[in-house]
Image (cartoon, rainbow, N blue to C red):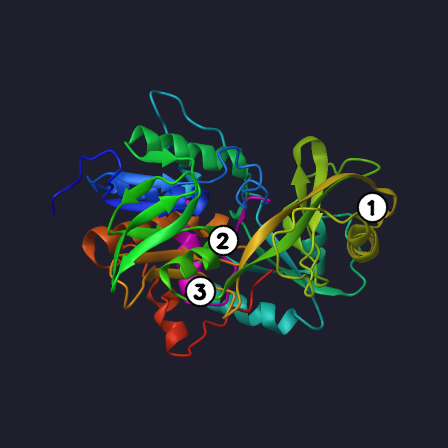
Amino acid sequence: MGFSTHPQTFDLMIIGGGVIGSSIAYHLANDGFDGRIAVFEKDPTYEKASTVLSVGGIRRQFSTEVNIRICQYSLSFYREFSERMEVDGERPEIDFKPRGYLFLGNEKNWPLLMNHQVFQRSLGVETQLLTLEETLRIIPDLYPGDLIGSSFSPGDGYMDPHSTLQGFIKKAKHLGVNYLYQEVVEIFREGNRLEGVRTKNGTKYLSSLIVNAAGPYAGEVGKMVGVEIPVVPVRRMVYLVRPPRPFEYDLPLTIDPSGVYFLHETGRQILTGKSRKDEPIGFNFSWDRQYFQEEIWPSLAHRLPLLNELRLISGWAGLYEVNQWDFNGIIGKHPEIKGFFMAVGFSGHGFQQAPAVGKALSELIRLGRYETVDVTPLGYERILEGRKVLEEEVI
């Protein structure tokens, strides 16, 4: 393969410079792809990027093998992130807190948690089923009245998503990846082959290999190629609250049966949120105080009575890239369009799955196969064939 030298010709282009696109770029460059790589990102500030607006969690408590394997690799990667991303003696600090994920169980969801725990342990995840007494040792302030126990995965946790993204970007650039802060508005295709893109400023860039890692904009990028990708933007809101007194212990990322989650933020404040099932599709970045007061606060105060007197400090909204087909990522190459790859539709799991997705795409593009993590079940073919990956642990 002859690699390009023309300044507007690249051997591979990635549309989307968030954590997925940047992980792909890093892994390609780090693994030995010696062609020219360009990452196109339309928001150089990353102000509205799904990555930086997330809570930065990673867990291995899933119900499908492919998602568990993906997150096993990603967790190992994040544990070594500072060393891997070192540039000229400087290491990024992502403040990873391995406090675990804690799924609280009541009469309704306890049988599911029990089944998942057996399956997770069969794949090497040290998930523990805790009694109510053991759960209260982790979070003494919980109201236990309607609970049976909990499912706990020690070693999982959460980190600073902004620092993580910047670590990927800095390392990728150090390895020679070009970041072009321009919006792609057109993709050139001739038959079943790709030829390049045009950006909003009218510049044309040439490449026969293009990766769609555009997050909530993935469906729009698909349309530019003439491919229907069932990924849509859906708002998810996060709220920062201050308890009347700080918890004197570290909170795991905790998921209540009501759907409300909570975790510690800097200064012993608490981040919380809950997916709204009837949230309309759209690019909406406004956050709703009323939703917190009516839907989240009552559930939060029920589970943590101390928070009856919390103070709402602030909130924000980011976008999930929701895969309407089955709420799992779409990873791999398009079966009919040569050179078109996808890493989209993670439905809230993109940040935690980014390292493994980057590794998988690097192997597929360079070697034509997956070696480290087999993500074949998440290929686009399943949509064409009418198959769904049914993941029961979607938050």
Q: Residue at x 38, y 75 (%)?
A: 384
The residue sitting at the left extreme is 2
Q: In the image, is 303 to the left or to the right of 341? A: right
Residue 283 against residue 176 in the figure, above or below: below
Residue type at the position of mark 1: Leu
User: At 37% across and 78% down in the image, what residue appears?
Assistant: 385
Q: Rounded to the nearest whole Å, what is the CA distance between mark 2 and mark 3?
A: 10 Å
The residue that mark 2 highlights is 217
Q: Nearer the viewer, residue 49 or 43?
A: 43
The span shown in magenta is 55-76
Q: Give above or below for 91 relative to 118.
A: above
Q: Quadrant of the C terminus?
A: bottom right
Quarter of the image for residue 124 reads bottom left
Q: Residues within 10 Å of mark 1 (few under 14, many from 20)?
A: some
User: Label 1 belongs to which residue?
Assistant: 307
Looking at numbered disc 3 in the image, what kind of residue is underneath it? Ile
Q: Secondary structure at mark 2?
A: helix
Question: Are the two marked residues, 2 and 3, in contact with CB atoms closer than 8 angstroms?
Answer: no
In the image, residue 74 lies in the stretch drawn in magenta: yes
* Residue drawn at 47 percent across, 57 percent down: 220
Q: Is residue 268 left or right of residue 190?
A: right
Q: Which residue is mark 3?
A: 229
